[in-house]
Amino acid sequence: MKYQLHSFQSAISKNHQLSQLISQAQSLSDIQSVVNRCLPEPHKGNCCASQFVGNILTIIVKNGSWLTKLRYDEEELIQALRKQAIFKSIKSITYRIDPTLGHNKTKESATA
């Protein structure tokens, strides 16, 4: 098992694009994890972090209703995020609506 892990790490280090992709995925996972900890409970599962670029966090929401609710809590969310090292420089949040957000989980759980 140790040999397989070493081979995988060696393959990744030789492939720059794959290494970059894994790094971006880990970064997004870290961002999502922090955002989830700071989100008020009702919002969890109805939105997800998309990116954090230039001190602006982009959050994807299910629909306009959740967007309105999240905007209402935006200042509190920004204050909570600023307490986290990764978001110390956050200035604002932008939103995008994706009605398919969460649909994959529903389909997977229905087939399981």
Image (cartoon, helix red, strand yellow):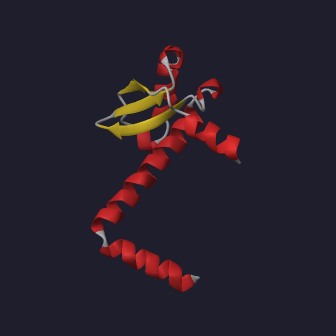
Relative to 8, say whether 28 is above or below: above
Viewer-side residue, 3 vs 35: 3
Name the residue rendered at 52%, 22% in the picture. 76
Name the residue rendered at 61%, 26% in the picture. 40
Residue 53, located in which quarter of the rendered image? top left
Residue 107 x/y as whole percent = 62, 40
Direction front: furthest residue: 111
Direction bottom: furthest residue: 3
Residue 13 x/y as whole percent = 35, 73
Counting the numbered discs, the total is 0
Name the residue rendered at 52%, 81% in the picture. 4
Name the residue rendered at 49%, 14% in the picture. 68
Relative to 63, say whether 84 is above or below: below
Relative to 23, say whether 80 is above or below: above
Residue 57 x/y as whole percent = 38, 33
Residue 69, located in which quarter of the rendered image? top right
Quadrant where the N terminus is found in the figure: bottom right
Residue 35 x/y as whole percent = 51, 36
Viewer-side residue, 102 vs 35: 102
Viewer-side residue, 99 vs 65: 99
Relative to 18, say whether 80 is above or below: above
Viewer-side residue, 111 vs 67: 111
